[in-house]
Image (spheres, grey):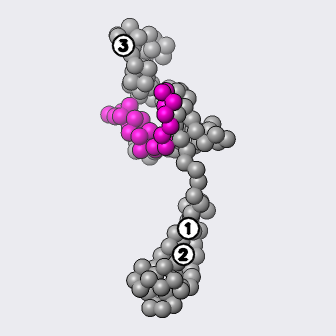
Amino acid sequence: MRCPYCGSLDDKVIESRTMANGGTIRRRRECLSCSYRFTSYERIEEKPFMVVKRDGRRQPFDLSKLSKGIERALEKRPVSAPSIENLVNEIEDEAIMRGKTTREISTAELGELVLNKLHKFDKVAYIRFASVYKHFEDLNEFITEVNKLGGGKE
């Protein structure tokens, strides 16, 4: 490892620590030339998890994009931030499990996964997300979806 202070390639590892559920190793190092101490991180480089768009394009899975969509659906709902974070993490975990062999998931499958989780979690958020995801064109489509929930009595 190159010393960030003097540029020497001679160093020794003083301490190693496993972090992030074993996914990362943090190493404290000391340069043998100038005695400068620095930290390095070692992690496995994985092929990125991809989302296949409706037009066939592929994009890296973006957790923040998923999170924003769910937070927007749950805006002004009586739901705590940790509950939202847990919901997002559950969706991410399930999406990755579904696309484990191919390392990808379609936007349709991801959208349905979000809808299923929101349906169990918060009916109002479900309707909000569904209205955007399913591209409701008129009031009748919206009313039909609410009626599927039991007339919206929640």
Residue at image coords 44%, 10%: 144
Q: Which residue matches tag 2?
A: 27
* Mark 1 nearby-residue class (10 Å; few <14, some 14–19, many ≥20): few
Q: Is residue 116 above or below residue 148?
A: below
SS assignment at label 1? strand
Q: CA separation, marks 2 and 1?
A: 8 Å
Q: Residue furthest left?
A: 76
- Amino acid, disc 2: Arg
Point out residue 79 in the picture as x, y percentages from the top left corner. Answer: 40, 38
SS assignment at label 2? strand
Quadrant in the picture for the C terminus:
top left
Contact, CB < 8 Å: mark 3 with mark 1?
no
Residue at image coords 57%, 35%: 105
Q: Any mark on residue 137, and which?
A: 3
Q: Which residue matches tag 1?
A: 42
The label nearer to you, 2 versus 1, is 1
Contact, CB < 8 Å: mark 2 with mark 1?
yes
Q: CA separation, marks 3 and 1?
A: 50 Å
* Mark 2 nearby-residue class (10 Å; few <14, some 14–19, many ≥20): some
Q: Is residue 13 above or below residue 44?
A: below
What is the magenta range? Answer: 53-77
SS assignment at label 3? loop
Of callouts 2 and 3, the N-terminal one: 2
Is residue 151 magenta-colored? Answer: no
Taking depth in this image into account, of 152 and 48 the one nearest to the observer is: 48
Task: Report if residue 131 is visible in the image.
Answer: yes
Of callouts 2 and 1, the N-terminal one: 2
Residue at image coords 63%, 37%: 98
